Image (cartoon, helix red, strand yellow):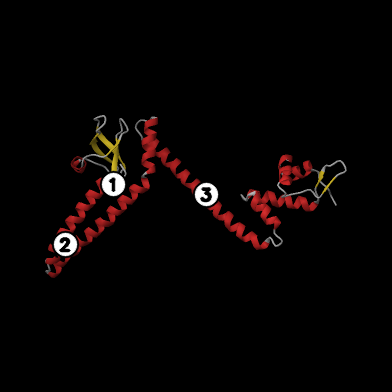
Amino acid sequence: MSKYTTGELAKLCGVSVRTVQYYDNRNILAPSELSEGGRRLYSEDDLKKMRVICFLKELGFSLNAIGELFSEKDPGSVIALLLDQQEQLLRTELAGYQEKLRKLEELRQQIKNAKSFSVDSLGDIAEQMKNKKKLFRVRSTMIAVALIAEAIEVGTILLWIFKGIWWPFAVGLPILIGLCTWISVYYFHSVAFICPQCHEVFKPKFKESFWAYHTPTTRRLTCPKCGHKGMCVETYGKDI
């Protein structure tokens, strides 16, 4: 039966000699015997075991998990559990990397769309990206309430037109006005704006913000810090 030195085993498995020695020190792969000169010698079974270790390491298993598996008398009873745990770990890591990739792509697009770029601009972009999910929830809530208001309005008007029943509209009108008012108050309570000049994050006065010219993500406002009047970028601001 073939015998392999530490160097030969390392070469066959594509790892360093120090890795083989480290596995020996961790009692994961001990040599089958020692030569008269004290050199470690590994058998064919040791080579197979080393290749299994390398395979499991490629799948992301920790040495503790690998050692646990080899110490079991019936490894089949624990391998399924270890595989499930490793799969969950890898899926979690993958989700994290995908989120980082999404942020990188979004950052690249934000920089591409920016008229000018500076370190302060990068801070503004980071603020927007950090609060994007919160801002999305605010808008989703507004849309849901708006749909309820629209249903009340359309439903009561149709009853009045086709059935001649006018009182649901009269009753629904104050509710409709109340919902629309709530949407406005909720929105301005939940958002803030970033000045493109001094990069201050601020909350404008309700009256100024309500009547200001705006796009879906910007609003023409006056910065309270530097006095700049122009299109300021919307961000989440309930905590400000």
Q: Quadrant of residue 117?
A: top left
Q: Residue type at mark 2? A: Gly
Mark 2 or 3 closer to N-term?
Answer: 3
| Residue 116 locus on image (x, y percent) | 35, 30
Relative to residue 67, is residue 228 drawn left or right? left
| Residue 18 locus on image (x, y percent) | 72, 40
Relative to residue 116, is residue 60 drawn left or right? right
Examine the rendered structure and indicate whether residue 119 appears above or below residue 39. Answer: above
Residue holding disc 1: 190
| Mark whose residue sits in front, 3 or 1 | 1
Residue 173 or residue 204, whichever sits in front: 204
Residue holding disc 2: 172
Real-space Cα distance between discs 2 and 3? 50 Å
Which residue is found at the position 24% from the left and 37% from the top?
220
| Residue 54 locus on image (x, y percent) | 68, 48
Q: Residue type at mark 3? A: Leu
Real-space Cα distance between discs 3 and 1? 32 Å
Residue holding disc 3: 94
- Would you call the spot at circle 2 few (<14 residues within 10 Å), some (14-19), or many (20 or more)? some
Mark 3 residue element: helix
